[in-house]
Amino acid sequence: MSGSHVRSWYAASAPDFPAQATLEGTLQADVCILGAGITGLSTAIELAEAGLSVVVLEAQRVGWGASGRSGGQAIFGFGCDQSKITQAVGLADSKRLFDWSLEGLALIKGRCAQYGINCDWRDMHAHVPIKPRHITELKNWQNDLAENFDYPLQWWDREQLQAVMPNQRYLGALVDTNSGHLHPLKYTQGLARAALGLGVRIFEQSKVTQLVRGDRPVFKTVHGQVQCDFAVLAGNAYVHGIAPELDDKIMPVGTYIGATEPLGETRAKALIGNDMAVADVNWALDYFRLSADHRLLFGGRASYSTLPPPDLSGTLRRRMARVFPTLEGVKMDYVWGGFLDISLNRAPHWGRLGSNLYFAQGFSGHGIAATGLAGRVMAEAIRGQAGRLDMFSRIPHRNFPGGRALRTPLLVAAMAWFKLRDALF
């Protein structure tokens, strides 16, 4: 619904955020940013802290898109395995990029402390294997991260995992105490409050209809326009046609989450005793965590056709009961979804077009931490320190095959194969 958030547990549990004005008339700014999600707001904060005048244009509400609807799991690295980045840029630069991903995690914690953002942060994340081949894959990943990136992770055998998460489905866990989870809409709204406090002008219900490029780009909306020295595209999966050369580099993928009825503290802790976030390693993965009010937040369905799956609530409840049989029959109070943006190689696609138009997209389901980093990296480049953005720009990105007509059917067919592989091997 235009003008309001999609119905979700996040929207129901976040504090009220005051509506911002709709853009009317003509404004001037040093920088204008399309999108009031984590990417755009993080860019705005960095630039405003440096003294630049910043305008943010949002088509709906602050955090309306993926930033306010995601699974809320903040994890090291990027959407692809680090080995893909190593193949693209070499080990030395891959190490630098990996270290910067850790900066993205530190940035969340630092912003929360600096600006008093209460977003229910909890430490610890676990990747869990379902099949023996998953154990091999996870241990190989653990060894690579330790040997090549100086990032040690803990391996828990099945007995160690069951001590905190009694469960017969998983065979162990690869655990990171540095990663964690949060309430994404509370975090995004906290960033917006911080930006407003720094003098950033945020306009909601101000969909950009056209970008006029030039020495001073102009973002046009139905009722106004902003002329700026630098323009930033931070709308990800929800932006089409503003910079057409970027559109074919990403694909919108629907992802869906449910929130159970309140379970009570005792019952919730019996599911995940240490309050960590968990994700399995199937291609069509399940991921879950507890909420601050003792619900289970469970995601486990994705749509590569852009159409919502049928009987979404029933599907999520069945998948949840397969993981936690004691929750058979538990009601889902909320079920919601939205689009995230994937790149063909699942690596981040960040860069610039010409000398004054910057973009960050292709977070590939790994955006909670990486979006904040993207904002910092783009802000650095705008201020004349482009080394880190140039490093990300070295990662090659191809268009999705098939053109406009066939790329979605081709992706759906490919995903069907990976889901079959999950089931059979």
Image (cartoon, grey):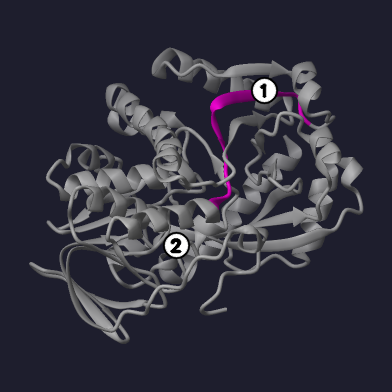
Q: Which residues are magenta?
A: 170-184
Height in image: 248 above or below 51? below
Label 2, residues with CA under 10 Å away: few <14, some 14-19, many ≥20: many
- Give the mark, 1 or 2, whose residue is nearer the N terminus: 1
Disc 2 designates what residue? Answer: 237
How much space separates mark 1 and mark 2, taking CA atoms? 33 Å
Q: Residue at x 51, y 36 (%)?
A: 75
- Left or right, 396 with respect to 284, comes to left
Q: What kind of element bears circle 2?
A: helix
Q: Could you say where residue 54 lies in the image, as x and y percent from the top left?
A: 24, 62
Q: Is residue 175 magenta?
A: yes
Residue at image location 19% in from the left, 48% down from the top? 50
- Residue positioned 50% across, 16% down in the render: 152
Residue closer to the observer: 59 or 142: 59
Q: Residue furthest top?
A: 147
Q: Amino acid at mark 1?
A: Ile
Q: Main secondary structure of the magenta part?
A: strand
Q: Give residue 351's mark.
A: none
For residue 77, side relative to residue 10 (left or right): left
Q: Identify the amino acid type marked 2.
A: Ala
The quarter of the displayed image where residue 150 is located: top left
Quarter of the picture containing the C terminus is: top right
Where's residue 330, x and y in %? 88, 53
> How many numbered circles does the render carry?
2
Horizontal and vertical percent for residue 132?
72, 24
Rendered image: mark on residue 135:
1
